Image (tube, rainbow, N blue to C red):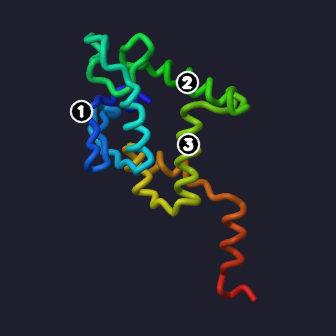
Amino acid sequence: MSELVGINLSNIDFGEYRLTVIGKGNKERTIYLNKACIKAIQDYMSVRPKDGVKNDFKGSNKALFLSKRKERISKRTVQYIVEKELLKAGLDTSKYSTHKLRHTAATLMYQYGNVDIRALQELLGHESIATTEIYTHVSNEQVRNAVESNPLNS
């Protein structure tokens, strides 16, 4: 989440469909964006405040995402927005969170999107592949399908 709130306007390369973020340990990495992400950012940019943005120690004037007070959003603000949207969707906020959504997205990409575990590791910014393996739990249905797919099954 600190990567999200730390995004600056200059980190986005619209032509190459990518952005640069600073992760744990001050490590810089590139995140590739799809067309839907680029469009969403462009749509947001059309309503993002331009006047009166604070020039403070947080670098608010450089930030992509701004609060109503025209300063860089905080991690707590992101949590609040996600909680509000979860409630609107009728979901239990004691069961869902920003971290749970990240975990779910990664699991779905791995299980249904045929995303390689190394690509997933890079996308999530994990130092160790062991951390990424948490997202690769195999469902009972996948195991059953593997057994049924065995060529010796007659």
Position of residue 37 measured from the top left corner of the image (x, y, whole percent): 42, 44
Residue in the image at 72% along x and 61% along y: 140
Position of residue 147 measured from the top left corner of the image (x, y, whole percent): 70, 75
Q: Quadrant of the N terminus?
A: top left
Image position of 9 with respect to 59: above or below: below
Q: Which residue is mark 3?
A: 103
Identify the element where label 3 is drawn.
helix
Question: What mark, if any, has residue 10 been given in the picture?
Answer: 1
CA distance for labels 2 and 1 = 24 Å
Which comes sooner in the sequence, label 2 or label 1? 1
Closer to the camera: disc 3 or disc 2?
2
Q: Which residue is mark 2?
A: 81
Q: Quadrant of the C terminus?
A: bottom right
Q: Residue furthest front?
A: 46
Identify the element where label 2 is drawn.
helix
Residue in the image at 69% along x and 71% along y: 145
Tell which of 85 and 28 is nearer to you.
85
